[in-house]
Structures are given as C-alpha cells and as structure tokens.
Amino acid sequence: MCKENEKETVVEINEAIIAGKRALSALKEARQSLKCASDWGIADLVGGGFFINMIKHSKLEDASQKLESAKQHIQVFQQELSDVVLPYEIHIRVDGFLTFADFFFDGLIADWLVQSRLKEAREEIDNAIYYVSTTITDLQNYEKQYMLEKGAY
C-alpha cells in the first residue's frame, strides 16, 4: 500500500472518530433533555396543573428537537463508517392524540403513557450511547494498530 493510501485511511478513521464524538455529544444532550421532560412529567402526574403541563410540553418539544439532532449526527457517523449499520433507530414520538389528550384532559392515563414513552426513548438513547462509545473506542484502537503496523508511531 502506498503512503498516499495509508494517509487516506488514517484521515477516514479520524473523520469517523470525530463524527462519532459529535454523535455521542448530541446523544448525551438528548438524554439530558429527556430527563428534564420526564421530571416535569412526574410533576404533572402528582398534580401539576395547567402551567406545569405547558412547561412539560415545552420540554417535550425541546427533547424532540435534541433527538432529531442526535439522529442527524448518527447518520453522519454512519456515513463516515460507511460499512457499519446501526441495528436500531433512535426516536421519540408523542402522538398527536397523546399530546392533545394530555394537555386538554390532563388525565392520569395520558400522563402515564407519555412517561412510558419517555422511559423507552431514554433506554434507546442509552443503547445508542453505548454503541457509539464502543465504536469510537474500536476505531481508536484500530487506528493505533494500523499506525503501528505501518510504522507511523
């Protein structure tokens, strides 16, 4: 393998590592945002009222935006890995009916369903964080091994 190809390989590995770190950061932000939304959801469950409900829905919207950002970063990470396919999809969906029912009827069942979905989304994010972290570590180890084999260290 010529030096040019070796450099290109190292550049590709580094681009994947950088993309992975960005995805990891976005996932951690999304996890924190979901925790915040969940906390407000618990406050709503124990008798929050109209204003708590409005704050909770604002936090849900923020969490949804952070999740979308994390998905975009993971897609870039996947592109950089090109031959690695994530075995799951990160998503959060608070169906229109649940949002409507929760906001206007403020019922215990609707609140519980929202909390259940937030818990599922947090579990998915934790799985994604584990996968991305492991993949970054594998890439870093591969890069070190590659460089040792090529005599670059």
Image: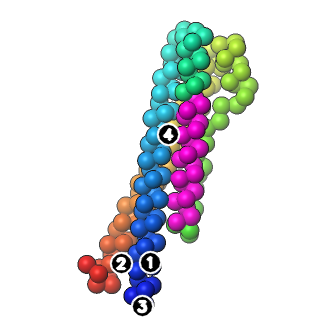
Which residue carries the number 1 mark? Answer: 9
Question: Of 51 and 126, which appears nearest the observer?
Answer: 51
Secondary structure state at the residue bearing disc 1? helix
Q: Dots 1 and 4: beta carbons under 8 Å?
A: no
Question: Badge 3: few (under 14), some or many (20 or more) residues near its Cα, within 10 Å?
Answer: few
Q: Amino acid at mark 4?
A: Ala
Report if residue 45 is visible in the image. Answer: no
What residue is at 54 percent from the left and 8 percent from the top? 47
Q: Nearer the viewer, mark 3 or mark 2?
A: 3
Question: Badge 4: few (under 14), some or many (20 or more) residues near its Cα, within 10 Å?
Answer: many
Question: Of 109 and 32, which appears nearest the observer?
Answer: 32
CA separation, marks 1 and 4? 31 Å
The furthest residue to the left? 153
Could you say where residue 100 lies in the image, as x and y percent from the top left? 71, 21
Could you say where residue 67 lies in the image, as x and y percent from the top left? 56, 41
Secondary structure state at the residue bearing disc 2? helix
Which residue carries the number 4 mark? Answer: 30
Which residue carries the number 3 mark? Answer: 2
Q: Amino acid at mark 2?
A: Tyr
Q: In the image, which disc is placed on residue 146?
A: 2
